[in-house]
Image (cartoon, rainbow, N blue to C red):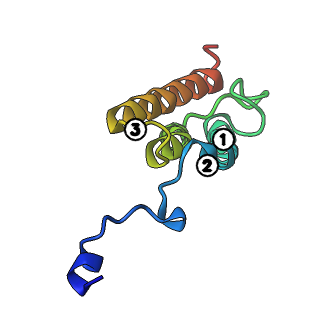
Amino acid sequence: MSADRQAAAPSSPQPWRRQPGPLHLLLAMPLALSGAWALTIMGGFAACGVSGCSGGGFGPSYDHRPLSALLVITAGAVLAMPLMLIRWAPRRGVRLGVAAAIAIGWSLWSWFTINGVI
């Protein structure tokens, strides 16, 4: 075979160069869930303190509400990150839509739970 034919040979993806597939979500999602849970708990402490949102006799403190909102939004982004980055669906729009729905859902659920609406 000449050098031109070897260079023009179709290149198949090498096994070690494949994109991460749906099986990688089994490892990534528990890690993302634990990170999102930790950020949500920190957001709850930032919003309400250790004594709770009723104030526990000291009255509620609303000083750290922006920090709590930022932590809750970050928790949603952390949870959605593996769904965006790992190629579990062939279309990018599907992955982005599911990740956005998960991020917004987690953020709203945790914010409403922290503030006592749910």
In the picture provided, is 92 more to the left or to the right than 14? left
Amino acid type assigned to the residue bearing label 2 in the image? His
Mark 1 or mark 3: name the one nearer the start of the chain: 1
Mark 2 or mark 1: name the one nearer the start of the chain: 2
The answer for how far apart the CA atoms under marks 3 and 2 are is 15 Å
The answer for how far apart the CA atoms under marks 2 and 1 are is 14 Å
Q: Residues within 10 Å of mark 3 (few under 14, many from 20)?
A: few
x 25%, y 85%: residue = 2
x 69%, y 40%: residue = 41
Amino acid type assigned to the residue bearing label 3 in the image? Pro
Q: Disc 2, disc 1: CB below 8 Å?
A: no
- Secondary element type, mark 3: loop
Marking on residue 24: 2
Q: Which residue is mark 3?
A: 90
Q: Position of residue 56 (x, y in %)?
A: 79, 28
From this view, report whether residue 57 is shown above or below residue 16: above
Q: Which residue is mark 1?
A: 33
Q: Residues within 10 Å of mark 1 (few under 14, many from 20)?
A: some
